[in-house]
C-alpha cells in the first residue's frame, strides 16, 4: 500500500488563505516491533477458487471450507484492531476546541480504517467462539480488548480506551472524547472483484454518515463506485454540515492516499487543481500487503501474559505465518471440528455459550442493541478461560 516509512497520509486543506493542513506522515513504530514476517506469502497462482466452489454446489456459502492459501495470517479480531492504526487522529480531536474541526479529524479517522484494505485480498481467519485479542500500545496511549461473542451469526466485539481516559472506542464505532461527545458511523460496502477468475481487487463504495450526537453536526461521505473506466477508483467526496444543515467544510480525496478538507467556496474554485498522489506498494507485496502496523499484530512479545484464548496462540495462524501451509490447513480443520464438537456437546446438555468480556446491552447514543464491554479483562484474571485451541 505504502512504503514502510510512510504508509498513510491524512491531510486537510489546500494552498489558500482559508485552509489549514495537517500532515500525518509518521507511522506507528516500537523499539522492538518487527518489520517483516517469518515467511513470505505463498503464491496463489496454482489454486483455483472455482475448482473448490464446483465441489460445493448446493452448500451454504458460509459453510464452505476454503484452504488457508486464500487467507492472511491474522484473525479477524486482529484485523478489526487495525482501526487503531491512526489513533493519533482521535488524540488530536481531543485537543480541538471547535466542533467542526473535531468532525474533520473524526472523519479522517473513519476513512483511515479502510485504507489498509487496499490490495489486501487475503481473508483473515474466522475467530473461534470465545477467542480474544488484546492490543497494548502504551506509547500510543491506548489499550484494546476484543472477543468473538457469537459464532452463528458471527459477531466480534471490541473495546478500546485511552490510558488517560480521553476517549473510548467500541465495536459499534462509538468513540467518546473529553468534549463529552459521541460519534457513530458505519463503514462503506466492501466488494471483492474477480473471486473466480482474474486478479482480485477490492472496491469500497456507498454513503457513510458520521453523526455527532452532542452537537448535531453531521459528516456525509460518498465512497465512489469505480465505474466503467476506473476514473472514480478509491475516490471519496463529502461535506460537513452543522445542526442547521449549513455546509461548513467539503472533504475529498482517496481512501488509499489522503483526504482534504476545505471551505466549500474555495473548493469550487480549486476543484480542478486537486493534486494526485501515488502510493508505493512494492515493498509490502510479499508480506500479504500488510502495513507496518499490521506486521506487528501477531508478534509474540516476551514476558507478556496472555489468556489461552488470544489469537496469537492459534496454531493454524502461526503455522501460516511461518510458511507451513500443510500444518496450517490441518490445524485449521482440527480447530473447526473441535468447535463443532463443543457446539454439539452444549446442545446435548442444553447449555448456552456465555461470553466473558462483553454483554448484550443498549447503545446509549443510538438506542440499538449492542455488545458492550463489561470490564475486568485488564485485571488479568484468566483462570476460567475456555480451552478453544
Image (cartoon, rainbow, N blue to C red):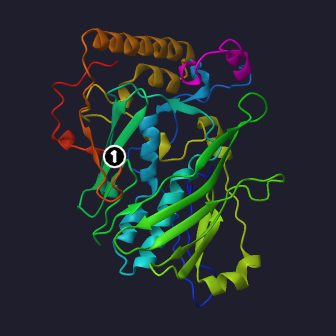
Instruction: Examine the rendered structure and indicate whether residue 220 appears above or below residue 119.
Output: below
Residue 325: which quarter of the image? top right
Residue 174 shows up from this direction: yes
Q: Which of 221 and 40 is in front in this view?
A: 221
Residue 95: which quarter of the image? bottom left
Q: From the viewer's perspective, is 22 left or right of 230?
A: left
Residue at position x 51%, y 27% from top? 321
Residue 29 image point, x, y percent: 43, 52
Residue 26 shows up from this direction: no
Instruction: Examine the rendered structure and indicate whether residue 93 appears above or below residue 6.
Output: below
Split into 4 quadrants, where in the image is the C terminus? Answer: top left
Residue at position x 62%, y 82% from top? 264
For disc 1, the marked residue is 369
| Magenta region | 48-64
Looking at the rendered structure, the secondary structure element under dot 1 is strand
Number of other residues with Cα within 10 Å of mark 1, as a class: few under 14, some 14 to 19, many 20 or more: few
Instruction: Examine the rendered structure and indicate whether residue 190 appears above or below residue 235.
Output: above
Residue at position x 49%, y 53% from top? 186
Amino acid at each position: 500500500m505504502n512504503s514502510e516509512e510512510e504508509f498513510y497520509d491524512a491531510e486537510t486543506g489546500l494552498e489558500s488563505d482559508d485552509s489549514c493542513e495537517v500532515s500525518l506522515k509518521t507511522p506507528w513504530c516500537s523499539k522492538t516491533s518487527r518489520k517483516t514476517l517469518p515467511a513470505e506469502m505463498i503464491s496463489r497462482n496454482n489454486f483455483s477458487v472455482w475448482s473448490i466452489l464446483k465441489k460445493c454446489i448446493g452448500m451454504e456459502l458460509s459453510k464452505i471450507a476454503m484452504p488457508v492459501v486464500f487467507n492472511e495470517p491474522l484473525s479477524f479480531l486482529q484485523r478489526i484492531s487495525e482501526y487503531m492504526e491512526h489513533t493519533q487522529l482521535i488524540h488530536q480531536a481531543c485537543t480541538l476546541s471547535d466542533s467542526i474541526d473535531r468532525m474533520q479529524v473524526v472523519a479522517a479517522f473513519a476513512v483511515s480504517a479502510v485504507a489498509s484494505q487496499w490490495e489486501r485480498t487475503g481473508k483473515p481467519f474466522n475467530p473461534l467462539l470465545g477467542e480474544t485479542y488484546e492490543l497494548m500500545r502504551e506509547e500510543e496511549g491506548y489499550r484494546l480488548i476484543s472477543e468473538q461473542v457469537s459464532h452463528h451469526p458471527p459477531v466480534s466485539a471490541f473495546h478500546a480506551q485511552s490510558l488517560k481516559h480521553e476517549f473510548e472506542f467500541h465495536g459499534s464505532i462509538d468513540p467518546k472524547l473529553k468534549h463529552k461527545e459521541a460519534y457513530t458511523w458505519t463503514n462503506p460496502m466492501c466488494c471483492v472483484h474477480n473471486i473466480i477468475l482474474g486478479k482480485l481487487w477490492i472496491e469500497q463504495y456507498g454513503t457513510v454518515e458520521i453523526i455527532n450526537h452532542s452537537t448535531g453536526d453531521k459528516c456525509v461521505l460518498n465512497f465512489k463506485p469505480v465505474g466503467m473506466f476506473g476514473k472514480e477508483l478509491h475516490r471519496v467526496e463529502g461535506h460537513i454540515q452543522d445542526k442547521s444543515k449549513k455546509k461548513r467544510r467539503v472533504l475529498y480525496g482517496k481512501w488509499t492516499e489522503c483526504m482534504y478538507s476545505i471551505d466549500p467556496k474555495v473548493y469550487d474554485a480549486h476543484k480542478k487543481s486537486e493534486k494526485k498522489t501515488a502510493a508505493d506498494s512494492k515493498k509490502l507485496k510479499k508480506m500479504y500487503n500488510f502495513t507496518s502496523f499490521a506486521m506487528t499484530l501477531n508478534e509474540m512479545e516476551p514476558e507478556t501474559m496472555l489468556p489461552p484464548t488470544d489469537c496469537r496462540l492459534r496454531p493454524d495462524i502461526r503455522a501460516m505465518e511461518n510458511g507451513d501451509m500443510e500444518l496450517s490447513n490441518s490445524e485449521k480443520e482440527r480447530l473447526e471440528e473441535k468447535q463443532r464438537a463443543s457446539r454439539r456437546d452444549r446442545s446435548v446438555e442444553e447449555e448456552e455459550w456465555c461470553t466473558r468480556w462483553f454483554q448484550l446491552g443498549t447503545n446509549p447514543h443510538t438506542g440499538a442493541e449492542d455488545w458492550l464491554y463489561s470490564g475486568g479483562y485488564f485485571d488479568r484474571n484468566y483462570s476460567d478461560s475456555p480451552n478453544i485451541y
